[in-house]
Image: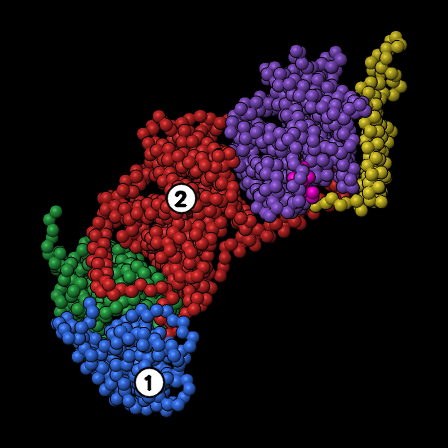
Chain colours: A purple, B yellow, C green, D red, E blue
Amino acid sequence: MNFSPVHFIAVPLFAAFLIPIVGRFSKEAVKLIPGLVLLYLSYVAISLYPIALQKPIVEIIAGFKPPFGISLYFGPLAAFLVTMVMLIGLVIWLYSYKFIIREPLEKYYMLFMLVIAGATGIMITGDIFNMFVFLEITSIAAYSLTAFLRDKDGAEAAFKYLLIGSFSSTFYLLAVMLIYANTGTLNIADIAAKMQTVPNQPKIFIMILFLVGFGIESELFPLNGWAPDAYSQAPSPIGGVFGGIVVKASTYAMMRFAFVLFNFHSMFELILVLGVITMLIAEMSAMRQQQIKRMLAFSSIGQMGLIMIAFGVGTDASVRAALFQVFNHAVIKTLLFLAAGYLVFHSGSKKISALDGLGHNKPITSFFFALGALAIIGLPPFSGFWSKLYILTSVAKGGFLASVVLILFSGIIEAIYYLRVVGRLYFKKDVSQDNVRRTPISGLVAMGILAVVILYVGLYPHQIIDLIKPAAHDLVDKAAYIKYGLLH
Amino acid sequence: MIYYITAILLILIGMYAVLTKKNIIKIVIGLSIVDSGVNLLLISIGYIKNGTAPIFSVKGLTPDKMVDPVPQALVLTAIVIGLGVTAVALSLVIRLYDHHKTLNIDKIRKLKW
Amino acid sequence: MDINWLKVLGIIITPIIAFIVGVAYGGIVRNITARVQNRFGPPVVQNFWDIIKLYSKKTTVSHGWMHHLAPVFAITASVTTLYFIPVLRDSKLFANLSFSGDLIFLLYIMVFGSLGMALGVGQSGNPNAAIGVSRGLSMMVGYEIPFVLALVAIMIQFHTTSLNDLLAVQDKFTNWIIFQSPIAFIAAILAFLGMMGYAPFDVVIAPAEIASGPPSEFGGKYLGLMQTSRSIFTFAKLVLFTDIFLGGAGDFGTLIVKTFLLYMIPVLTGIVNPRFRTEQAIRFFWKWPTVFGVIAILAVVMKG
Amino acid sequence: MISIPVLLLLIFAAGLLAFIAHHTIPVLRDAIVIIAITIAGYIVWQLPGQTSNVNFSIGMFAINWGVTEYSQLFGLLIAVLSFFALIYSSAFMANKERLGYFYMNFMFSIGAMFGIVYSQDLISLFFFWEIMTWSSFMLTIYCCEEAQSVGLKYFIFSAIGAYSILTAIVIIYSGLGSLQLANIFANFGTMSIAAKLAVVILLITGFGVKSAMMPLHVWAPDAYKMSPAPYTAIFSGALSKMGIFGIGLVLFKLAAGQGFYPYVQEILAWIGALTALFSTFYAIFQTDAKKLLAYSSIGQLGYIITGLAIGTPLSITAALFLTIMHGIFKSMLFLSVGAVYYRTGTTNMNEVSGLIRKMPYTFFTALFGIITVAGIPPLGGFAGKWMLYESLIQSNHYFLVIVIFFASTAAFLYLYRFIFSMFLGQEEKETENVKEAPLRMIVPMLILAVSTLVFGVFPGLLLKPISGAMGYLGNFQHAWETSVLFNNWGSEIDLNTIVTSIGGVFIIAWILITVKGYRKNRYVTTKDIHTSGEVPTGNENLTYAIDFYKPFERALGSVLKPSVDKLYNYTGKLLEDSFEHLRYVYTGNGQTYAMYVMGFLLILFLFSELIFGVAL
Amino acid sequence: MTYDKNSKKIVDIIQNFARKHSLWILAYGTGCGAIEVPPTMTSRYDGERFGLRGAATPRQADVLLITGYLATKTLKRVIRTYEQMQSPKYVIGFGSCTINGGMYWDSYNTIKALDRYLPVDVYINGCMPRPESVISGFIKLQQLISEGKANGAEKYQKNLEWYRENQKKVIHNWKMPDYNW
C-alpha cells in the first residue's frame, strides 16, 4: 500500500467528524473507531518509518510545491515522535475504552481524535501557519477535554488553560505575522533559508514571541500556571494525553524553531536556565501536594524542565538525550496517569492519603504505579535511568556542572515524593472499601503495554537510541532540513 | 500606518482588559479584542494602498498593485479559530457561573498551590 | 616434633610460682591493711587456707554451663597472660611463650578473662552480679585509655611492640623506662590502680552494696578457682609492669622486691581511700591519667 | 566456559523465577534460589580461570565485565554469605507473607552486588549500584508499616550517595571521555586538579553512604533493624562492603599518587576512627538488638575505612581481613538475633532474657560472634585488630590508634549487653516455651561460627586472596605465614602458639573444675539466687536490662547529645518548609498566571540586550 | 564423697584445717545481737585473726550467724538463706533468744528454740553476748570442725522431714523451692 503522511492528519480529522454522527446509531462504534484509526495510523507510522529514515518524506498538499504550498515534512524526528504519539494514543484509547463511562462519549472520542490530529499535525507540518491551525485544534480540544467532567474544578482549570492558551496562540500568530512580513514566506525550510538575511532586531523579537508562545504550551516556569490545574482536573487518560502528546508537540515546535530558525547561543542558554528553574520549582511544589494527580502534574512539569535543560545544552548528544527523555517521559508519565486514574477511581478520592493500602486491594494497578514511579525516578533497570544518565553526561560535557548537581538534587526530591506515595500504597492498612469494582482488563492491558515498553527500553536502551540518533540529527542539522524541505 | 497603530492599540486594550478586569466575561471580551487586533495587524501586513484583489481580472495588473492574498487567507482562518476559542470560553464561563455563582475571577481559585 | 622440655617445665612451674607469690601477696596485703587499721590481721598464709577451704567445699551450685565455665575463662586469661610475659630477663626457663606475642596481644588477652567471667556471671541471673559487670566493663573502658596511651608512647619511643625488646632496652639501671619516660609511667600507674580493683576503684565488687557484685553467685570450687586466677593475674600484671617500666628482674629476689613495691602503690592507695562511684572513676581516668598519657606521646613525638 | 553474564543472568532469573514460583508452586521457590546460589558460588569460584573480559556496548557507553583479584575477594564473600543466608531464610521466612517479593529482591540485590564487583566500567557499576539500592530498599520496607519512613530515609541517603557517584562519573566522562575502569585508572592523572579532587570526594561520599560513614550513617540502624534477619546479614555483611570495595578502588587506583592524597588519607582515617568511636557509644545505649548490631556494624566499617585510608601494606591487609571477617561475624550475629526473633518475636533486648538453655546453639553462635567482634584471641577478629593497631602505630598515627582502641574497648560494653540481655540473665516466664531454632537456621550459623575459629588460627587462609587483591590495588606487599603475622618493626605473633596455649589452659582448667566434686554439682534455675532470703515469685522482675550502662552514660555526659540525625531532620524540615512557600507562586488565579506571562514577555523585551545581546 | 567422721585421712585433716581457719560469716542481723558483730570484727577484737571474714552472699559463706530473736516471718528468710549455703555449713545461734526465746519467751510471733528449725552447731549465750564470748563461740566451732563434729548440715539433710514439719508449723504460707544444698 502506498501510505502518505497526510493520513496522520486526515484520518483522525475525518474520524472526529464521523464520531458524532456514528454516535447517533451505536455507542460501541464510537468506542471502536478511534482504536481502529489509531491502529491504522500506527501501522502507517511504522511502515513509513524506514522510508523516512533513509530520506525525509516531503508531502506536497494541493500541488503547490514548497515554498508556495503547504507541505508536510516527515523526517526521522517526525517519524519518531509520531510513532510515539500513536503508541501513547493507542494505549490511552485502550484504557479509555472502559474507563470513560461518562456521557457524552462521542464528544470525548471526537476531542481525543482532534488532539491526535492536531498534535501529529504540529509534528509533521512544514508550514508555520499550518502549525498555528494545528496548535489551535489541539488547544481547543484540550480545553474542552479539561472540562470534560463538567465539574466545578474542571471548568475552572479549563478556563485558566484557555486564558493562558489564548496568549500562547496570540503570540504565536504575531510571530508568524512578523516572519511573514520579514521573509514573505510561511514554509519553515524556506524561512530557515531566508532567516540569515533578516536583521537581528526583528529576529530577536520574533524569537521572544515564539519562546513565550511555545513556552506556555511546553510548561516553562513562569508560563505554566495552567498546567497543574489542567492535568489534575482532566480525566486521567487525558493527563497522559497532555503529558505524552500535547506538550511534546509544542516542545517539538519550539525546538524545531530554535534549531532551524534562530540558532542563537543565548537562546539556548535561556532555555537551559528556564529549564533548571522550571524543574526545581515544579519538583519542590510536587513535594507538598495532597492530590496525586496534581503531584503527577508538577512532576510532569519538572520532567519538562529536565528535557528543556538537555535541549538547552544544544549539542548533538544532549539533543539525543532530550529526545530519549521525551520518549521516556511520555511513556512513563502516561503509565503513571493511567494507574493513578484507577487508583483514584478505586479509592474514591483524589487525595494521596486516600490511597492507603490500595496495594493489597488492587495489586496490579498499584504495581504499575510503583513501576512507573521507580522508572521516573531514574532507577535501573528501567528506561528512565538511561535517559537521565544520557542527559547528565551530555550536560556535564557541555560544561554545566551546576545543572548536573541541580538535576540530581531535584531527582532526590522526586524520589522522596514518589516513594511516599508508593509507600502508602503498599505499607499502610487498607482503608478502601472497594472490594467489588475491579480494574478492567483493557485498562490493565494498556498499562501493561507501557510497563513492558519501560522494561524493554530499560534493558535494551541501544535499540531506541538507534532510532533517536537520526531523529536528533534531523533536528540539529539545519542545512539538511532546508535542503529536503525545499525539495532541492 | 493607522492600521498598525489601531491594531496595536486594540491588542493593548484587550490585554489591559484581560489583566485587570475581574469579571470573566470582560476577560473573554478582552481576549476577543486582542484577537481582533492581531487579525487587523495581520491583514494590514499584506495591505497596499490603492491595491486591488490579487485576481488577474484586469489586463496589465502587476503584482505590486495587488494586495498580498496570503494574509487574507490567514486572517480568515484566524477569525474562525478566534471565534471557536471565544465560543469555548463563553461556554466555560457559563459552566463557571453555574458552579460558582460568581463571575469574579479572584473568587474562582479553588485550584491553587 | 621435638619438644622443648625446658619450655614445658617453664610452662608448668610458672603458674605455680605465680600462684604462690600471688596468694602470699594477698595475705601480706591483708596484714598490712590490718596494721593500718590498728589490728593484728590474719596470718600471712590465711589466703591459702581460704582457697583450700573453697576447694574443699562439698557441694557446688551452678546455674548452667556458662556459669560453670566462667572461672575457667578467668584462669585461662591469667595463665595465658603470664605465659606471654617474660618473668625473668634472659631466663630461658621463664621466658615461656613471650616470643610469640606482643604488647597488643597482651592487652587483648587480659580482657579475655573479664569477658568470660562476665558471661558466666550473666548466666547466674543475679541482678547484683549484672550490675557489677556493668560497672566493671564501664570502668575498664575508663582505665584502658590511659594505659594504652602510656603503652603507645613507649612503643613509639622504643620502636617496638615486643616486651622482650623493651626488656633489652633497659639494660642498666638508668635506662629503665620509668626514668626514660616518667610521664608515661604516671599514666600507666594511675591506670594500674583501676586495673587492680582496690579502693577507690572497687565499685565493681562493692560487697555491702551489691553483694560482692559479679562473684555473688559463685561459691565453693568456682570461687576457689576465681581466687586462684586473681592471684595469678595480680602477679602477672605486676610482672608486666615491672618488665615494662622497672627493667624487669634478673632473679627472683629482685623480682619479688620490685613487684612488691609496685604492688604497694594500689594497696596503700586503697587502704586510705573511700570508694568512687562508677562515673566518677571513669571521669577520673579520662582526666588526669589521660592528660599524662597524651603528654607522654607528645613528648615522644617532640623528641623525635 | 561459564562466565559473568551467565552468573548475573542466573541470579536475576532465579529472582524472577522465585517470584513466579511463589505465586504458582510455592514449594519450588526456596529450591530455586538455593540451587541458583549454589551454582553461582561454583561459577564465582572458577571465575579467576577466565582471562577474557566481557565487552559490549549500550548506546554510547561501552560495557566491560571482568574479574580481578580484588573483585574476586568480594565476589567470594558475597557468594558464601548469600548461600548461608538463603539456607537460613528458607526456614526463617517460612510462612511469611509476600515471599515472592522477598526472594526476588533478595536475589536481585545479590546479583547487583556481583555486578558491582565484576564491573570493569563505571556505567555498569552504577547500574548495578542502583539496582542494589532499590532492591535493598524494598527489603527494608518489607516488614511493616513502621519501616516506611525508615525506608524513605535509607532511600534518600542512598540517592544522595548514588548521585554523588553519578556526578563523579559524569565529571570523569566529561574529562576523560571513557568510563572503562582501566582507562580511568591509567589516565586519571591527566584531569585537572579540581576535577580530580571533586571526583575523589564525590566517590568517597557515594561509597561512604553504603558503608555508613559517620555523617552519612543515620539510615543504617533503622534500616538494619527493619529488614528481615537473613537479609540483614547480607545487608551488613556483604552490601555494606560494596562501599568498602568502592573506597578501596578510589583510594588506591584514583587518589593514590595525586598531590592531595595524603590529606584525603588523613581525613578519611579520622572520619573512620570517629565513626568507630561514636557509633560504639551509640551502640552501648541501644535497646534493640538489631540496632545495637547495626551501630556495631557502622563502627567496624569505621575501622576498615581507617585501615584503608592509612594505606600502608599492613593496614590494607588489616582492612581487607577485617572486611571479610566482619562479613562473617556480623552476619552470624544478625542471624542469631534472627533466630531469637524467630522464636520470641522480638529483638528488644529488654523483653527477652535467659535464652541460653533454650537456644544453646544460637547462644554459641552469638558467643563466637561477640568474641570475634571484640577482637579477643583466639578467634578471627584478633588477627585483623592486631594488624590494624600495629599498622597505625607504625605509620605514626598515635592518636588515631588511641581513638580506635578506645572504640574497641568500649565495644565490649555493647557486646556484653547484647549477649547478656538476650541469652543470659533471668529466664522469664514469657520465654518458657521457647525452643531452639530449626536445623536449617542453626547449621549456617554454626558453620560461620566455626569458620571464625579457623580464620583466627590460620589467617593465612584469608591473607592469600587478600594479598592477591592488594597486588591489584597497587603492588602492596606484606609478609605473612599461615598462622604467623608480622608487623613492620619485626615483632610477630604466632597464632598457633597462642591458640594452643589458650586452648590448653582452658581445657585443663575445664577438666579440673568439672571433675572436682562432679557428682555434687547441682544445677539450679536462675530464680534460685541470692535475694537476701526472699523467695522470688514468678512475676518479680529480677532482670537487670533497662539502662544497663547508666553509669557510663553519666560519665560520658553530654557527648552524645548532639545528634546528626536531628540535624538532618531539621534540615529536611527546613527545606520542605521552603518548598511549601515556593509553591505559592501557583496562586490559582488565572489572571495572575496571565500576568506572569506578560511579565515574562516584558522582561524578555526589556532586558533583551542583557539576555540576547541585542537591544530592541 | 560422703563425709565420714571416723575416717581421718590426711586429706580430711588438711581440709578440716583449712575450713577451721577460714570461716566466712554470713551475719543475719535479725536482732539486737547484730550490734555485737562489728566490734568483733574491728580493731578492738579483730576477728580476722582467726580467719573470720564477712561474706556477702550465702553462696560464699560458711557460717550463718543468727544474731538474736527470729520472728516467724524472718525465719522463712533465714531458712532460705541457710539452704542456699553450700556445705559444709555451720549455724551459730547468738544470744539467749535463739536458745529459749529469751526475753521474748512469751511472744506470739517469735520462735523460741532455733534448734527445732535449723541445725545449730554452736550457741553463744548472753543477752547480748560480748565480743569475747562471740570469739570463744567461734573457737568452739573451730574445735568442733577440726574434730569433725560440726556436722549440722548432715543432720539437717538427714532429718529434713522433721525440720520441714516444724518449719511449716510456724510458717503458714510455705512457698519455698526444694532444698538444694
Could you tell me if residue A205 is visible in this image?
no
Q: Which residue was labeled with disc 1? A: E113
Amino acid type indicated by mark 2:
Tyr
The residue depicted at 85 percent of the width and 38 percent of the height is B94
The residue depicted at 33 percent of the width and 64 percent of the height is D524
The residue depicted at 84 percent of the width and 35 percent of the height is B90
Q: In the rendered structure, find residue C237 and report the number of the disc placed on it.
A: none
A71 over D69 or under it: above or below: above
Amino acid type indicated by mark 1:
Ala
Q: How many residues crowd around disc 2 within 10 Å: few (fewer than 14), some, or many (20 or more)?
A: many
SS for callout 1: loop
Count of numbered circles in the view: 2
Query: Who is closer to the viewer here, C219 or E88?
Result: E88
Mark 1 or mark 2: which is in front? 1
Could you tell me if residue D559 is visible in this image?
yes
**Disc 1/disc 2 C-alpha distance (Å):** 64 Å
D615 over D536 or under it: above or below: above
Q: Position of residue A265 (x, y in %)?
A: 62, 31
Q: Residue furthest top?
A: B59
Asked if badges 1 and 2 are on one and the same chain, I answer no
Q: Which residue was labeled with disc 2? A: D88
Reply yes or no: does residue A440 show up in magenta.
no
Chain designation of label 2:
D
Residue E165 horizontal side relative to residue C258, left or right: right
Q: Which residues are magenta?
A: A341-349
Q: How many residues crowd around disc 1 within 10 Å: few (fewer than 14), some, or many (20 or more)?
A: some
